[in-house]
Image: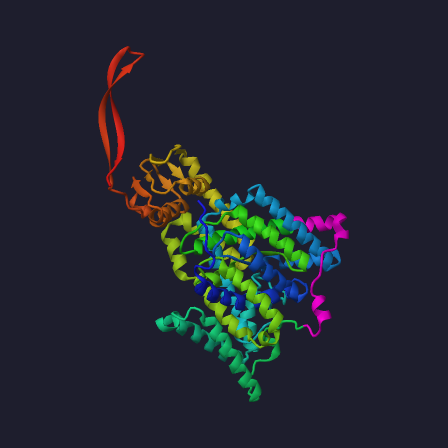
């Protein structure tokens, strides 16, 4: 059931969160373009298109799209193999067309089969990576580009060895700015007075104060002054001719090159998988528990990559780092992503000199807090308490994401989850029954012996199709095992959507371990009725059980 969204309904909070995401996205766009061996502005173009075009077309309320660190190795290799950036742009255009096709054939539905513990493990792992990767930037040591999420870095170091290298490259000015920025953000979000000033986010205050402070250090000749190589480094066109040269178009003459098609298919597959993972993660973060149509998302990403390639931009995906920053900043709707794209475009065109005064240490402070919230130790404790079948896939994904990359980590978590499901199915048969209904009837959803995360898609569709003002009985009397993904769906349906749409939900037979309270608002009645048995040629008495709601 899709509701029309008023994009301007939460403009104050969305503008503030869009501003924060813009500040985070700026160095990420530049860093990823640099690591990809592409023109720096190609990252900015991708960020602008991802914010404005994809942000508008997507049905996700808090996800933010832009150039992704997960594609840097593919892009770097592809540009070298194809011989020119223009040929690479043609591959990106074809990849966009492939994604568009995937959306139309409903390939996005695969995201329903990503278990919650794997998604949460991925988020926690990314949180640790973000936190560890920002420590060198916080100390004024910037050999690795902003936005890198790989364990092995381009500078020959890894995530952990880099931390020891920091000790030989400490920049006191950066440390002062990092500590001050952290203090401003934490204090700003703690006091009610500052929270009411929604249009002025804490991150913006931290950036302004750090820029002013560093200018004071520079003008006073202080040793604390942060040098240019530790600031945002956005190219500044000195003439109209240089600005026109930024827009690069695809080389359509390379359409017959088989390498172009191989690169296109690779980008389409990897970008689509990363996007679907991020969308699932974004839906988990959303406090309103709104679900995103992943097929529409693939179409939006496809159109975004087509437009980006025509303007000379990098390929894009939905990005966890920006989405997390957006959620933490209090975004309410996709207007936040659109605003971030508009701010990115306007500021790059009008005030690049001002942007180049922002210390990377300030942005590191913002991302340190984003990383901490994603990798909150409470999440690990939560899955530990849920038992080994939830904890092992979670922790395996978490560790693998930290020590390899996002896709390998999720693949390992998925394999372990499938093994557990297959092991469970060897012991218990599963049967799920869903009856058709019309408005006004009592809807019965009977869960059988085992309900795994593989049944998540069908149950999600069932709950989504239930009309307003309905009466629903969800019966788990015969159930031996229910996956936590399905339990979460039922909990969220009962606590949020049912209340919003006046749906009366009655739960029957749920065990105490499921943490779902069974309902007392109904009763089963058993009556005796006379029926004629044609085989016995006599009238017999039968029991008829009926469920009745007590309003």
Q: Quadrant of the N terminus?
A: top left
Disc tally is 0
Could you say which is closer to the camera, residue 135 or residue 333?
Answer: 333
Specify the principal SS of the magenta part: helix
On the image, which quarter does residue 246 sit in?
A: bottom right
Q: Residue at x 42, y 68 (%)?
A: 198
Q: Is residue 408 visible?
A: no
* Residue at image point 63% right, 59% down: 72
Is 257 within the magenta? yes
User: Which residues are the magenta region?
Assistant: 237-265
Taking the image as shown, residue 286 lies to the left or right of residue 133, namely: left
Q: Position of residue 187 (x, y in %)?
A: 39, 74
Question: Where is residue 247 shown, x and y percent of the image?
Answer: 69, 63
Residue in the foreground of this view, choosing between 19 and 169 = 19
Q: Which residue lies at the image location 61% right of the left edge and 72% below the top edge? A: 350
* Up/down of 362 relative to 74, above or below: below
């Amino acid at each position: 059931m899709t509701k029309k969204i008023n994009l301007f309904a939460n403009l104050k909070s969305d503008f503030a969160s869009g501003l924060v995401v813009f500040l985070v996205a700026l160095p990420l766009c530049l860093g990823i373009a640099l690591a990809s061996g592409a023109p720096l502005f190609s990252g900015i173009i991708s960020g602008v298109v991802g914010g404005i075009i994809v942000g508008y077309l997507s049905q996700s309320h808090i996800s933010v799209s832009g150039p992704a660190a997960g594609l840097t190795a593919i892009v770097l290799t592809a540009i070298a193999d194809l011989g020119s950036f223009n040929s690479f742009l043609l591959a990106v255009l074809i990849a966009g067309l492939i994604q568009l096709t995937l959306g139309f054939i409903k390939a996005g539905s695969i995201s329903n089969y990503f278990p919650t513990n794997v998604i949460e493990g991925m988020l926690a792992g990314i949180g640790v990576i973000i936190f560890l990767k920002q420590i060198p930037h916080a100390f004024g040591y910037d050999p690795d580009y902003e936005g890198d999420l790989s364990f092995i870095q381009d500078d020959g170091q890894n995530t952990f060895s880099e931390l020891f290298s920091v000790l030989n490259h400490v920049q006191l000015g950066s440390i002062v700015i990092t500590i001050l920025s952290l203090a401003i953000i934490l204090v700003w979000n703690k006091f009610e007075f500052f929270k009411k000033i929604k249009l002025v986010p804490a991150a913006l205050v931290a950036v302004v104060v750090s820029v002013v402070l560093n200018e004071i250090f520079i003008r006073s000749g202080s040793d604390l002054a942060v040098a240019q190589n530790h600031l945002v480094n956005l190219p500044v066109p000195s003439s109209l001719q240089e600005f026109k040269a930024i827009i690069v178009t695809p080389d359509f003459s390379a359409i017959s090159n088989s390498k172009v098609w191989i690169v296109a298919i690779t980008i389409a597959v990897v970008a689509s998988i990363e996007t679907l993972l991020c969308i699932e993660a974004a839906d988990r973060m959303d406090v309103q528990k709104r679900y995103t149509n992943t097929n529409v998302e693939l179409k939006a990403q496809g159109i975004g990559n087509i437009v980006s390639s025509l303007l000379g931009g990098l390929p894009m995906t939905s990005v966890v780092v920006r989405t997390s920053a957006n959620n933490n900043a209090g975004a309410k709707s996709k207007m936040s992503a659109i605003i971030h794209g508009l701010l990115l475009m306007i500021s790059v065109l009008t005030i690049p000199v001002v942007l180049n005064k922002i210390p990377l240490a300030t942005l590191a402070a913002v991302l340190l807090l984003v990383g901490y919230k994603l990798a909150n130790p409470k999440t690990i404790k939560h899955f530990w308490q849920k038992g080994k079948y939830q904890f092992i896939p979670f922790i395996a994904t978490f560790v693998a994401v930290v020590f390899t990359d996002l896709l390998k980590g999720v693949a390992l978590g998925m394999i372990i989850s499938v093994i557990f499901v297959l092991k469970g199915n060897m012991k218990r048969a599963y049967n799920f029954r869903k009856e058709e209904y019309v408005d006004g009837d009592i809807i019965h959803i009977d869960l059988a012996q085992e309900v795994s995360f593989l049944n998540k898609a069908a149950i999600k569709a069932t709950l989504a199709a239930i009309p307003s003002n309905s009466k629903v009985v969800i019966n788990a009397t015969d159930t031996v095992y229910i996956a936590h993904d399905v339990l979460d769906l039922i909990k969220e349906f009962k606590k949020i959507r049912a209340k919003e749409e006046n749906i009366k939900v009655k739960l029957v037979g749920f065990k105490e371990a499921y943490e779902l309270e069974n309902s007392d608002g109904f009763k089963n009645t058993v009556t005796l009725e006379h029926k004629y048995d044609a085989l016995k040629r006599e009238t017999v008495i039968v029991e008829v059980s009926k469920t009745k709601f007590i309003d």
